[in-house]
Amino acid sequence: MSDLNRKTDSAGKRDKGGAPSPSLPLPGKDDPSPLTRHPSLIPVIAIDGPSASGKGTVAQRVANQLGYHYLDSGALYRLVALAARQRGISWQDAPALAAMTRSLNIQFENGSILLDGLDVSEDLRAEEMSKGASEVAVHPGVRAALLDLQHGLRKLPGLVADGRDMATVVFPDAQTKIYLTASAETRAERRYKQLLEKGKKADLGEILRDLQQRDARDSQRSTAPLQQCKDACLLETSNMSIEEAVRFVIDAFERQKK
Ligand code: C5P
């Protein structure tokens, strides 16, 4: 069974992690196609769910299979947390964070995320930034500042986006909406094994407590809380392989096209 918890480390990327490939038929300024003029016609598969549910791995594989772009929206909140740390801005300082987020110099390049021209992809995956991301994500000004950037990644031939509010706020008109989850215990075990495989120290109890805290913060905040929206298909992966989860998403997408 494949590891459902392997996480990508970039946002807005294509294939195995990369900025949208230049070989894609990306719309140009003079492109008269109706899809370019009406981005809402460009297909989006929105996959939301709690931390460590494996949605990043599933979303990325679905994107690869369909040849679609991929947005890891969690990486953007991690980036905000990291940038704030570097600039000495508190994760609680909502106005300063919102102003900073609006002026961030972010680039997606060959599967990496660059902040002020430096590759920070690895730094974003630190446990500290998982916590920071969920703290900065509660501020409406930060969320608003990231909206245009996310909308801008809706490009031909389509986008697979994962996060907490993809189906509810960012792409409410997504063609396919999936709420991907697993029990907190299963998610904690997956994260635990993943850390051990990387040769890192890990404490299962601590990981579980940390996940539960993040779940609570993400689902109880007033702006864009994590929730399954009415028109999303539930995908419970506690007893599922990555391949089965990917098939479920692609089947749901194919069904919706008919
Ligand atoms: O998905 P990931 O674990 O990288 O996300 C880190 C944190 O970013 C989440 O715990 C959540 O608080 C926040 N987030 C969010 N909205 C998104 C994606 C992530 O609030 N669309």
Image: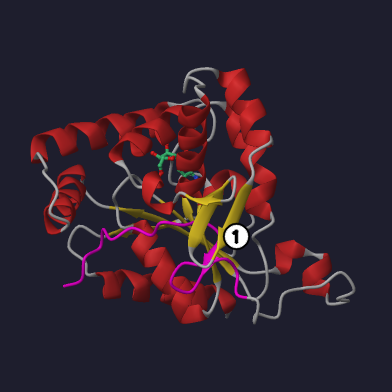
Q: Is mark 1 within 8 Å of ligand 1?
A: no
How many dots with numbers? 1
Residue 6 placement: quadrant: bottom left
Q: What residue type is labelled 1?
A: Ala
Q: Mark 1 points at which residue?
A: 174
Q: Is residue 14 magenta?
A: yes
Q: Quadrant of the C terminus?
A: bottom right
Residue 251 placement: quadrant: bottom left
- Between 76 and 159, the residue placed more toward the observer is 76
**Residue 234 falls left or right of residue 149:** left
- Between 84 and 187, the residue placed more toward the observer is 84
Residue at (11%, 53%) from the top-left corner?
Answer: 196
Residue 205 placement: quadrant: top left
Classified by dominant secondary structure, the portion drawn in magenta counts as loop
- In the image, ligand 1 is in what quadrant? top left
Task: Examine the rendered structure and indicate whether residue 214 appears above or below residue 162.
Answer: above
**Circle 1 residues within 10 Å: few <14, some 14–19, many ≥20:** many
Q: Is residue 170 magenta?
A: no
Residue at (43%, 53%) from the top-left corner?
Answer: 121
**Residue 126 falls left or right of residue 20:** left
Q: Where is residue 219 in the image (x, y as percent from the top left)?
A: 40, 33
Residue at (23%, 33%) from the top-left corner?
Answer: 210
Question: Is residue 252 something that shows in the picture?
Answer: no
Residue at (17%, 45%) from the top-left corner?
Answer: 188
Residues shaded magenta: 1-21
**Residue 34 falls left or right of residue 100:** right
Q: Position of residue 218 (x, y in %)?
A: 40, 33
